Image: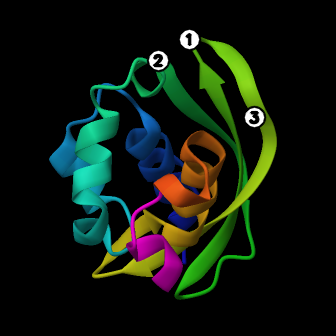
Amino acid sequence: MPGAAGTIAANWETFFSAKSSTAKRVSLLENGAQFQKVIAAQSTSSLASTASAKVSGVTGITSTQATVAYSIDIAGTPALANQSGQAVYQGGTWKVGDKSFCSLLILELGKSGVPAACSAS
């Protein structure tokens, strides 16, 4: 898939950008509508408002998924380095895999604080 790596990286970084609207973030997450409430709540979180992601590589690209190497920064300082996540191709768009998002939510909120949609992913 020509150009997929660049699109995946851009969409991943847009999803994790505090500057992106809730609607945009929902559109860039696999099964995003199921996570709209938690994404909206995060938009008011002081932690999430300073978070960003930097993609360092995209590998294993197939027609439906890819592996993304990334880091999460908080206020420009690396907080989670060298992470591995899944991007999925859904509805004609490369999106952050909901399993990857749920893994990060568990780190932030603990298992009891994640939405029910995480147990399905």
- Is 104 placed left or right of 17 in the picture? right
Magenta stretch encompasses residue 26: no
3D distance between C-alphas at marks 2 and 1: 5 Å
How far across and how far down the image is residue 10, in percent? 46, 46
Contact check, label 2 and label 1, Cβ < 8 Å = yes
Task: Tell me which amino acid carries mark 2.
Answer: Thr
Quadrant location of residue 45?
A: top left
Front in this rendered view, residue 55 or 79 = 79
Residue underneath mark 1: 75
Q: Is residue 97 visible?
A: no
Instruction: Mark 3 or mark 1: name the one nearer the start of the chain.
Output: 1
Residue underneath mark 2: 50
* Secondary element at image label 3: strand
* Secondary element at image label 2: helix
Count residues near mark 1 (Cα–Cα under 10 Å), then give few for <14, some for 14-19, many for 20+: few
Say which quadrant the N terminus sits in: bottom right
Instruction: Mark 2 or mark 1: name the one nearer the start of the chain.
Output: 2
How far across and how far down the image is residue 99, in percent? 57, 70
How far across and how far down the image is residue 80, in percent? 75, 34
Contact check, label 3 and label 2, Cβ < 8 Å = no
In the depicted structure, whether residue 46 falls above or below residue 120: above
Residue ID at (39%, 74%):
117
Q: Which residues are magenta?
A: 114-120
Task: Name the outermost residue toward the left.
Answer: 23
Residue ID at (52%, 66%):
4
In the depicted structure, whether residue 19 falls above or below residue 8: above
Task: Tell me which amino acid carries mark 1.
Answer: Ala
How far across and how far down the image is residue 93, in percent? 34, 71
3D distance between C-alphas at marks 3 and 1: 12 Å
Residue underneath mark 3: 80
